[in-house]
Amino acid sequence: MPKISVLKKSKRKELIIEAAFDLFASKGYSATGIRDIMRAANISKGGIYVYFDSKLDILLAIVERMDAKRHTIKDEIDITDESEEKLSSYLSSRLKVFQTLESQKWNRILFEFWSLPKENEELSIILEKRKTSFHSDIKGIIQHGIRMGVFRSDIQMDLIIYQVMCTINGAALLSSSFGNVLTNEHISAAVEMHIHFLRKNNNV
Amino acid sequence: MPKISVLKKSKRKELIIEAAFDLFASKGYSATGIRDIMRAANISKGGIYVYFDSKLDILLAIVERMDAKRHTIKDEIDITDESEEKLSSYLSSRLKVFQTLESQKWNRILFEFWSLPKENEELSIILEKRKTSFHSDIKGIIQHGIRMGVFRSDIQMDLIIYQVMCTINGAALLSSSFGNVLTNEHISAAVEMHIHFLRKNNNV
Amino acid sequence: MPKISVLKKSKRKELIIEAAFDLFASKGYSATGIRDIMRAANISKGGIYVYFDSKLDILLAIVERMDAKRHTIKDEIDITDESEEKLSSYLSSRLKVFQTLESQKWNRILFEFWSLPKENEELSIILEKRKTSFHSDIKGIIQHGIRMGVFRSDIQMDLIIYQVMCTINGAALLSSSFGNVLTNEHISAAVEMHIHFLRKNNNV
Amino acid sequence: MPKISVLKKSKRKELIIEAAFDLFASKGYSATGIRDIMRAANISKGGIYVYFDSKLDILLAIVERMDAKRHTIKDEIDITDESEEKLSSYLSSRLKVFQTLESQKWNRILFEFWSLPKENEELSIILEKRKTSFHSDIKGIIQHGIRMGVFRSDIQMDLIIYQVMCTINGAALLSSSFGNVLTNEHISAAVEMHIHFLRKNNNV
DNA sequence: AATGAATGAGCTTTCATTCAT
DNA sequence: TATGAATGAAAGCTCATTCAT
């Protein structure tokens, strides 16, 4: 049996994560067996347990990565200052992510766990945190817009946050699970609609 | 004599479907075992296989039912005539459904399978059909609005359909899996935003 | 595949216990696999789990039996009244048991768990109880003898109990694990020695 | 130069044996993993296999050592001459050993293998030898006592040997596995009882 | 129609051992 | 000599499904 000892330890771990990521995305976490990962990563059954304590541990490593990337996106957006642009840029950044294949895979994995009961506490906490920070991100942006006098203040904060979250989550679902490609035009239209609705001097 | 046993038979089947429906919604399809269903439906293990060929078969029966109900909703809406109202009523009807516990359960089940579509061909076809008819429903309503001269025509049909689907699916996800309660205010705001965006004499 | 459905449920359970008992005695508990038991009991892997929750559960069932039998022995002895005879009869009954093949098997299983660390709490408690009741049985008999004036009272109770326990446990070990056959002569000699040592008018 | 490395080598080996000895005694042989030994001996997994061919090989090395020590004990006793004292001193020496922590550890290891003798042939032979030499040691001492006219000759040799072995093995079991501390008083009582039984002018 | 004992492929995980470095 | 990543057989156990009753 050939031993790929040329690959460094970290490379091997990376390989397993990537293989598992693809499999979790396409077959689903619970339908993916350690055997599948082992075959895809070209490693023996026991070999996987050198790098990970359990199947769940592999998932957690994947989720950690997703989180790291998500933070990167938010940080990039935070630099912009003008309020209306801030929402536009936040929304379109978030949606643009869904155009990547990687994000589509991520979302598939996420949906499996969001829709399932809290099997694992650690995971539940991570996902709950994601949701909360998601919510507060949007809140912050919109509040800022209102304070700046660009957004109307006669609308309940909660309602608009809900709507933005609907759009983002809906787009995530459509692009990742339903196979509807999300084009730049779709994104622009979505952004336009939300801004339009929020803008102050809108004669309704 | 035979009529009673037929009735009894269908009652038993009904019982299994209902038990499975609750379990699939709360624990998830793959996490639900035949044992769980058997206990919940107060039937023996072998007894289930009198009415269903497999666990998947139970799911399929559930999905079929969901489809039947969905059509009912659409048919009710089709009666209204005036265009703007038509979209309002379609959208709010669709969203209102998500306020019911039953729909939340349905969505949980659906999401598990939307995110893992390739497992079973039969199921994939059903879900694909749902999506297509969903799409054409919205298309029809908006086209009608444009023809009526109430909706602006300078916008690409595809984009607005996508947006409506995002909102609906996002609301489904939020209400069923994320635990965000969908109030009438949320619905009104969502409807308002979409109508606002589509209305003809909107000075952008 | 032939189904031995003629055998009643309890018979099947009995079969598994007996197969496991023999295997645990000859190969040891931890060296015996579920697969070994399954083959010996002519049952499928899953079939064992119809009757027992785990491998440990099988062992516990065996230990329960042992306990039941042990109590029978003690109860039989309790009937005798005259003190010296009481110890003789207790000691020789206990030792005679070691002549049976079944007891030898039991002891082998016991020794594996007595010498091993407390892997399972439930088992530890059972074994600890056995030891305690063992100790108090002997104590009761000897105290009675002293009260009756047949045994000398100048000896420390603790020492004689320890000696009796040494002899019994040593005989158990020799007969079950070392293969030394325990004859009636051995038993008589052992009894004689202990009585001799305990008798009142012994000029030391 | 080579001498130092030989010394180092044996030190390493020593270290492994000691670590394994403690672990086998406390956790049991089969429950102790190579990982445990490796950590306790501060050596890498592969490193162990430089000095030992297998886990069993480590055990064999431990058993060999035990044997060496046992012979030392017997040799020390052989010097004494007067018969009654000879047995007293043999018995009490043997029992006194059980007061040491090291011997308790040894016994725990031994009991695990005495009760499962067929696993390894080499080990079986060693243990069988131990038993035989044990037997002949006692035989020699008692025969000598009879020849000297101190012990009665109306008793079957076999029976008394069996009894002595019972006491010794019983004490080993009680002290090492049952946690019953063996005091000097226990030992004296045991010796006294045996001598008492064997002495010539005993009016039974 | 209904039961539940029985099946066996499948699961994740462990572990003594090997071997390229 | 020493390392530890890699191996793969085997472990205990689960579960949808079958089938004699």
Image (cartoon, coloured by chain):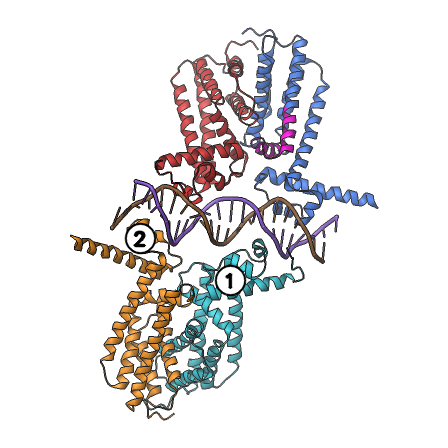
Chain colours: A cyan, B orange, C red, D blue, E brown, F purple
Image spot of residue B84 (x, y percent):
28, 85
> What residue sits right under mark 2 in the picture?
B48
Q: Amino acid at mark 2?
A: Ile
- Please check the rendered image and state whether residue B184 is part of the magenta-colored stretch, yes or no: no
Q: Residue furthest left?
A: B1
Instruction: Answer yes or no: is residue B101 visible.
Output: no
Callout 2 and callout 1 share a chain: no
- The answer to which quarter of the image holds residue C73 is top left
Position of D190 compared to C80: left or right?
Answer: right
Q: Amino acid at mark 1?
A: Leu
- The answer to which quarter of the image holds residue D187 is top right
Picture layout, residue A40 above or below residue C86: below
Of residues C178 and A76, the one nearer the viewer is: C178
Of residues B189 and A33, the one nearer the viewer is: A33
Kindly identify which chain the residue marked by label 1 belongs to: A
Element carrying mark 2: helix
- Please check the rendered image and state whether residue D124 is part of the magenta-colored stretch, yes or no: yes
Image spot of residue A149 (x, y percent):
41, 87
Q: CA distance from mark 2 to mark 1?
A: 37 Å
Position of C135 compared to D185: left or right?
Answer: left
Residue A60 has which mark? Answer: 1
Q: Residue at coordinates 31% horizontally, 71% vertically from top-left?
A: B98
Q: Which residues are magenta?
A: D105-131
Position of B153 compared to B72: left or right?
Answer: right
Kindly identify which chain the residue marked by label 2 belongs to: B
Element carrying mark 1: helix
